[in-house]
Image: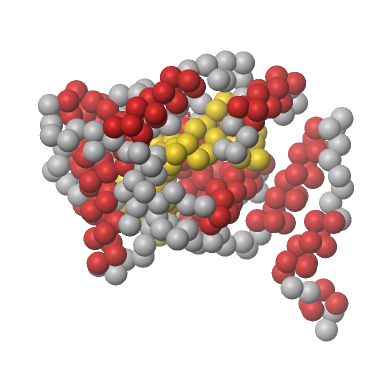
Amino acid sequence: MAVSDSLSDDERKAAQMGAVPDFDFDTPLAAQLALDTRRSITLRDSTFARPVQTRVLTVANQKGGVGKTTTTVNIAAAMARAGLHVLVIDNDPQGNASTALGVEHQAGTPSIYDVLIGEATFADIVQASPFSENLLCAPATIDLSGAEIELVSIDSRETRLRLALRRYLVDRGHSGEARLDYVLIDCPPSLGLLTVNAFAAAGEVLIPIQCEYYALEGLSQLLRNIELIQGHLNPSLAVSTILLTMSDTRTNLAREVAQEVRNHFPEQTLRTVIPRSIRISEAPSYGQSVIEYDPTSSGALAYAEAAREIAVRGAESTNTEGASA
Ligand code: ATP
Ligand code: MG
C-alpha cells in the first residue's frame, strides 16, 4: 500500500496545502493562483454541516447592482452542491435569480406573486433547478412588478411571505420531504413592501457590499430600516453576514473599502471576498450559476468558500427565528 493511501482525507488535504507556496502580493496573478489552489483543496468533496433548523437569509441592499442576485444564486448553488437542501425565493420583479437558476419564469408561470396575493402556495410554484434536485426556486415573473402597489390594500401585507413560507416548511415536514437547510431570499434594489416581506420572513440578513468608493453610502438607511422591522415585525432579525463583492484585488481602493467595512462590522464580515470575475458575469446568460458554469474558476471557488463560511458559522450559532421550521 502506498504511503498516501494510508492518510486520512484531512491529512492528505493538509499535506497538499503545505505544498502550496505562500502569497506574494507583488504578483497578483501568483497570489490568486495560490488562493484558488488552496480553496480547491479545502473544498474538494466537502459536504457542509446541516444547520440545526432551517436558516432563512434575506439578501438585501437597496443599492442597485451590488451583487445581491449573484450572491443569492451562487451561495445557494454551492450549498446544494455540498449536499444541502436549498430554496431560493426570487422576490424581485426583474426575475434575475430565476434566470440564473435556469427555471421557467415567463409571464403566466405560477410565481411568488401568486403566493403573495394568496392565490397559490409555495408547493404550487416551486421548481427544481435543472442542475440539482437539492436546489429549489420560487420564481418571479413580471407580474411581481405590480405587487408593491397591490399589497398595500391587502390584509397583513408585511407578513404574507412569512406566513406562506412557514406553512410550506411545516407541510414539507408532514409530507416526508427533505427538510430545507437554507432559504435565501433575493430582494429588489428598494426598501418597499417586497423587501419588508423578506425581512419579516427571515432570521438573518446577508448584505452584499460592493468594493467601490461609495460602498457604505446608504448602509445606515438600510440598517435603520432593519431596526424598524426588528421593532415592529420581527424582533429576532439579525444582520448576520456581510459579503464583500466585485473586488478588484489589484487596487488599493478595494483593499481600503474592505478594511473600512471590516472596521464597522468585524463580526459579520466574511473572510472570503468575491473577486470581480468575467466568468461570474457570463454565467447567467447560460441560465447557470458560476458554480455550474465554471466550477474551478476563481469566482466559483470564492462563492463556494463564502458558502462554506456561512455554513460553518451557522453550525456555531444559528438564529432560527423568522419562518424557520
Ligand atoms: P439589482 O439591484 O439590479 O437587483 P444586484 O444587486 O442583484 O442588482 P447583480 O445582478 O448580482 O446585482 O450584479 C450586477 C451585475 O454585476 C450583473 O451584471 C452581474 O453579472 C455582475 N456581477 C456581479 N458580481 C460580479 C463579480 N463578482 N464579477 C463580475 N461581475 C459581477
Ligand atoms: Mg438583483
Q: Looking at the picture, does residue 210 appear above or below residue 267?
A: above
- Residue 3 visible in the displayed image: yes
Decide which of 250, 324 is in the foreground and name it: 324
- Against 50, is 155 above or below? above
Say which quadrant the C terminus sits in: bottom left
Residue at the (61%, 20%) spot, across then down: 212
Q: Is residue 199 left or right of residue 132?
A: left
Q: Residue furthest bottom?
A: 1
The foreground one among 320 and 304 is 320
> Between residues 64 and 130, which one lies in front from this camera angle?
64
Q: Position of residue 218 (x, y in %)?
A: 48, 18
Q: Position of residue 253 (x, y in %)?
A: 70, 19
Q: Residue at x 64, y 30 (%)?
A: 262
Give the percent coordinates (x, y) of residue 220.
Answer: 48, 20
Whether residue 248 appears in this view of the structure is: no
Question: Is 171 drawn above or below residue 306 in the view shown?
Answer: below
Residue drawn at the location 51% of the way across and 45% of the way down: 75
Residue at 55% over, 59% down? 48
- Locate residue 114, reporting x and y percent: 19, 40
Position of residue 112 in the picture relative to residue 250 (left or right): left
Quarter of the view holding residue 269: top right
Task: Using the rendered view, name the quadrant where residue 221 is placed.
Answer: top left
Which part of the image, by quadrant, shows the N terminus? Answer: bottom right
